[in-house]
Amino acid sequence: MMSWTQTQSRPLHSTPLTPPPSQIFSVLSTLCRMDVVNQLVAQGQFRVLKVPLGFIKVLEWFFAIFAFSTCGSYSGMFKIAVECKNRTQSDLKIEVEFEYPFRLHQEYFDAPTCKSENKEPIFLVGDYSSSAEFFVTIGVFAFLYSTAALSIYVFFFDKYKENNKGPLIDLGVTGVFAFMWLVSSAAWAKGLSDVKTATNPDEVITMIPACKEDENSCREVHDPVMSGLNTSVAFGFINLVLWVGNLWFVFKETGIIAPFMRAPPPQAKPAAPDAYAQQGAYEQDPYASNQGGYQPDYSQQGYNQEAQYGQGYGQQGAPTSFSNQM
């Protein structure tokens, strides 16, 4: 029999002290990814998003999402009612569904013939997938390019400006997208107009043979909601304005316009007016040599007159000799 001390010294549970290698690897990989993300965030120049070049690119990113999502995710439905002379053959809740990419010639519904219990399929008219898919494709590619451009602006803006290649490529791609938004938005606006006509319940009713008989009555019950598609067209033209406006700011980054925006040369100072010149003339030294002012000649007139006064005094004031007085 084992003693009480022996049973107490034996461990009750044998659990491993170290985690499995797979868990260690997952933790290390998570830490490495976090370090990479932290370094990118620390090195990123997010202030570029505050200037027009980056801010407009953010708007392009958002509105591109709105454009292709409102068009590509659309699904609509309208209802019509066919009331036959024989009420048992009527169908008052016919639902007609359609969706992107608007290949309406593949959409159909079953309408009563008003001659028997059987129904016949009625297909819609038109295929408008080309304009819709083209519009959505431009939106998706514009979204992808905006994402890439924003990443370069934030993390590699110095390389973007190096050798002026980045701005030139950006200018060319921006110009192409501006043109593509114009074409795709105009094409989709025309395609949407045709879709509205093809899905108009009044137009669809004219395609039902039973509705052409006077004894039967057909009417619309519910119109399709087209607000989402109208919004997609509006977003398309907003993207056009944004991309065209962004051309100017990308063009400024190329430096092509820099030689034409030099500051004007400094203007020469105007010459001093005549008043200052006259004042300078008055301030000249009248006793300076080689000047045209009056200079008295002391050697001629003054001394000659003094000599004459001396001679006159000698003639008049000189005393006679004593012998002559005697």
Image (tube, helix red, strand yellow):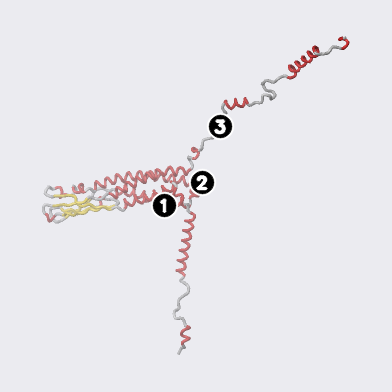
Mark nearer the N terminus (1 vs 2): 1
Disc nearest the viewer among 3 and 2? 3
Three-letter residue code for mark 1: Thr
Callout 1–callout 2 Cβ contact below 8 Å:
no
Q: Quadrant of residue 270?
A: top right
Q: Nearer the viewer, residue 68 or 49?
A: 49
Q: Which residue is under mark 1? A: 147
Three-letter residue code for mark 3: Lys
Callout 1–callout 3 Cβ contact below 8 Å:
no
Residue 130 appearing in the image: no
Mark nearer the N terminus (1 vs 3): 1
Secondary structure beneath label 2: helix
Q: Which residue is under mark 2? A: 163
Q: Which residue is under mark 3? A: 269
Left or right position of 49 against 86: right
Disc nearest the viewer among 1 and 3? 3
Three-letter residue code for mark 2: Asn
Q: Is residue 144 above or below residue 24?
A: above
Q: Nearer the viewer, residue 54 or 191?
A: 54
Disc nearest the viewer among 1 and 2? 1
Residue 182 location, x and y as percent? 35, 43
Q: Quadrant of residue 12?
A: bottom left
Q: Quadrant of the N terminus?
A: bottom left
Q: Quadrant of the C terminus?
A: top right
Left or right position of 325 against 277: right
- Residue drawn where x is 48% and y is 73% of the image: 18
Residue 118 location, x and y as percent? 15, 56
Could you give the CA–CA distance between mark 3 and mark 2, rounded to whole angstroms?
Answer: 40 Å
Secondary structure beneath label 3: loop
Left or right position of 259 against 123: right
